[in-house]
């Protein structure tokens, strides 16, 4: 219901655990359970909610992942093998109604991508990314640039720093262009254009989410719509 997608490492303090569905929800978000510690975990934040893991203040480590259309994934990884591709069940209510389950008017900007680092968190709506092409909100420990890729109706988030120096991007003629230097980067791959040995923007982990629900879990986080 919260439209969140994330990949966690299945180990805590060096010990493997098995995560399953607990049958519970917290603010409409999935609550996971592991039989090894008999603890409950938040799917959105990865933090332990109940049990021995909660008492120890444990949290799951996030693994790199990418939430994009399959056509974009194939463009990035053309040799990908798919073992099973089940029929997709659309959740169109996120997009087509002006009233979500919490009764808030969020048509057009209900969904987005979120980035978190060192206790600082920011989320940008897909609508804002579609409108601007590139959105670069400030953060304490990161310099993220949220990028919309029209061909694949998908978005990615890059670290806008090259060798520690932040660049300031705008989308021009389908490329990410730094305002100061004029350096150009491919928004799909993050590779610098026109230089065989050019720099490559590092991709950041970003979580898709219904932004109202994400804000509930990150009350101090900022949302750009």
Image (cartoon, rainbow, N blue to C red):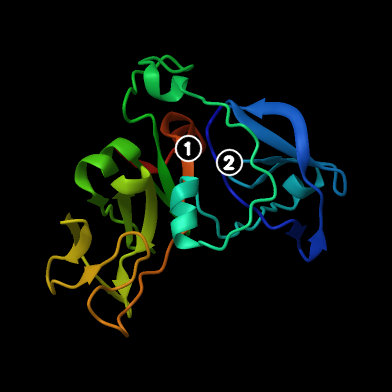
106 left or right of 178?
right
SS at circle 2: loop
Residue at the image position 60 percent from the left and 59 percent from the top = 63
Vertically, is 192 above or below 50?
below
In the picture, the quarter occupied by the N terminus is: top right
Pointers 1 and 2 in contact (CB under 8 A)?
Answer: yes
For residue 151, the mark is: none
In the orientation shown, which residue stands out farthest toward the right? 36
Within-10-Å neighbours for mark 2: few <14, some 14–19, many 20+ = many
**Front residue of this view, candidates 187 and 113:** 187
**Front residue of this view, candidates 126 and 186:** 186
**Front residue of this view, candidates 108 and 82:** 82
Disc 1 from disc 2: Cα separation = 9 Å
Vertically, is 112 above or below 23?
below
Residue at the image position 77 percent from the left and 45 percent from the top = 19
Instruction: Give the mark nearer the N terminus: 1 vs 2.
Output: 2
* Residue 81 x %, y %: 63, 57
SS at circle 1: strand
Residue at the image position 73 percent from the left and 45 percent from the top = 54
Vertically, is 119 above or below 219?
below
Within-10-Å neighbours for mark 1: few <14, some 14–19, many 20+ = many
Residue at the image position 39 percent from the left and 14 percent from the top = 99
For residue 44, the mark is: 2
For residue 209, the mark is: 1
* Residue 144 visible in image: yes
């Amino acid at each position: 219901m919260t439209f969140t997608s994330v990949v966690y490492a299945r180990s805590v303090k060096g010990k493997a655990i098995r995560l399953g569905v607990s049958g519970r929800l917290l603010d409409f978000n999935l609550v996971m359970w592991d039989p090894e510690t008999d603890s409950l975990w938040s799917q959105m934040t990865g933090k332990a909610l109940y049990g021995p893991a909660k008492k120890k203040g444990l949290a799951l480590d996030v693994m790199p992942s990418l939430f994009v259309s399959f056509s974009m994934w194939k463009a990035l990884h053309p040799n990908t093998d798919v073992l099973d591709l089940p029929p997709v069940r659309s959740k169109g209510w996120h997009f087509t109604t002006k009233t979500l389950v919490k009764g808030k008017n969020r048509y057009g900007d209900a969904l987005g991508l979120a980035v978190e680092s060192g206790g600082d968190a920011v989320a940008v709506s897909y609508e804002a990314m579609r409108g601007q092409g590139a959105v670069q909100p400030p953060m304490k420990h990161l310099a993220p640039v949220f990028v919309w890729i029209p061909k694949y109706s998908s978005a990615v988030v890059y670290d806008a720093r090259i060798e520690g120096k932040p660049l300031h991007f705008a989308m021009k003629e389908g490329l990410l262009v730094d305002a100061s230097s004029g350096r150009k980067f491919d928004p799909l791959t993050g590779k610098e254009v026109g230089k065989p040995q050019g720099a490559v923007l590092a991709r950041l982990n970003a979580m898709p989410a219904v932004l109202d629900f994400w804000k509930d879990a990150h009350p101090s986080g900022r949302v750009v719509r």
